[in-house]
Amino acid sequence: MEKDRILVVDVGTSSLRGILFDRKGKSVWKEQREYELEVSGDGAVEMDLGVLDGCLRSILEQAGTWLREQDGKLACITVTAQRSSVIPVDRDGNSISKAMMWQDTRAGEICGRLEGEKSRIYRICGMRPSPVFSAPKIQYIREQDEELYRRAFKLTGFQEYVLCRLSGQFATDLSIASRTCLFDIRKLEWSDELLNLFHVDEEKLCRLIPAGSAAGETREEITRMLHLERPVPVLSAGGDQQCASLGMGCVEDGRIAANSGTGSYVIALSDQPVGDEAMQVNCNLSAIPGKWIVEGSVLSAGKTVNWLKRLLFGGDGGFKEMTDACRMSPPGAKGLLFLPLLAGKGTPVWRPDMRGMILGLGFEHTKGDFGRALLEGIASEMKECIQIISGLTGTEYGMVKVAGGMTRNDLYNQIQADIYGVPVIRAFDNEATGLGAWISAAREMGWYASYKEAYETAAEGTAEKRYDPDPDHIRIYENLYGRLREKEAAVYHQ
């Protein structure tokens, strides 16, 4: 029993991770495979699924080798993934076209047509129509390539695609389904009203299962690849951001977490659906059955940092150079303002047409000022999300738990604390999504009586890092935050 492991497969936007956890939530093995997306000027952002298949096979083979060498037992595989992308597949789960990624904006015109229906849509699914989400993408496929729509046995996301690759079964958990714009977040079923509105046939969607539950068992090929004596359950842990929230310890109402990766997301847990008449934030199902999340989205965070790093600081080794240069720039970046809307604006207006801006540029500015202004701009976008969520939930959040790739940067964490005006606590496990998937699976396998107990067990013997706001910096950033909102309003909200 001591050697039981859980294999987490975490399908991100820019990489796939495989992590083996022991019974106490400690990572004992980890592999990562990075990949690039195909981006074109017409708003298309796509991925060849052959690339993902190769990465998945490589991860599974490496995990199988480790398990065989360590004489480890595997209790189950659990999957978490990016949300809202669309992959047409055949009856065997093979892709029949490239994935239409969540960043793809080609369905923007369809969303524009639905402007008059957005309140009705939001009341049912907790989200306004946006090209980010699955339903407009599916309608776009049907309108632009009806033959592809007809040939598709299912229209899956990455979570369902990998679940099928591992188990041969088509299933989607409620937390993933709630990111499609086709799901009723109160009745917990596909909405006939929304299916009709977006012209989607229910037969094209996967069967619904609770978050954390099993889609099936490992196929013979997967069982053999992992050197297992018998098949093991394949679980659907929940969407990546829902799992990240769980992995940061948001297991009770009244907690808030900020996860900064390719995009950044601010998530608060709730015991009931939270409505927003202004439709600024999303309300989705949590990775914890019976709970919901309120989520604010910054569509481009780490992706913009990587863009600036490549542009001004060189290739792979440029991140340290960028951070060192940012440290030489004072709070406020000498008046340089950076609105990081390179992929459009999410919360609160959900406008894919909005674009980033650099304002106040003068001869006095350096590369470090550009870097610092970007970090300040991202944190300011997240502050906007926190303020909106706080108003909707009626909760004053006295601290914010943070995780994600960007939080490896101490400077960024301090900037977050100074801009939010409350302490920021960096999660003990920076890979919060993977840990959250383990918590979900450990609870499902009966290892722990509650999600809280599983999280606390994983947290034993670890240390979190606290960043307290600097009072002098708070004043600077209150001014900066106001100026960013004013400039954005002047350009886009006249």
Image: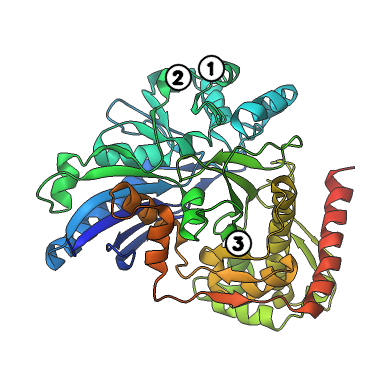
Residue 491: image location, x then y, percent? 86, 48
Distance between the Cα atoms at labels 1 and 3?
41 Å
Residue 7: image location, x then y, percent? 28, 55
Judged from the image, the secondary structure of the residue bearing numbered disc 3 is helix
Q: Earlier in the sequence, mark 1 or mark 3?
A: 1
Three-letter amino acid code at the position of disc 3? Trp
For discs 1 and 3, the disc positioned in front in the rendered view = 1
Vertical relation: 264 (above or below) 92: below
Residue position for label 3: 307
What's the residue at 58%, 29% (across, down)?
136
What's the residue at 60%, 69% (across, down)?
309
Residue 373 visible to the viewer: no
What's the residue at 65%, 66% (across, down)?
399
Q: Quadrant of residue 41?
A: top right
Residue position for label 1: 192
Judged from the image, the secondary structure of the residue bearing numbered disc 2 is helix
**Disc on res. 202:** 2
Q: Earlier in the sequence, mark 3 or mark 2?
A: 2
Q: Quadrant of residue 375?
A: bottom right
Vertical relation: 61 (above or below) 281: below
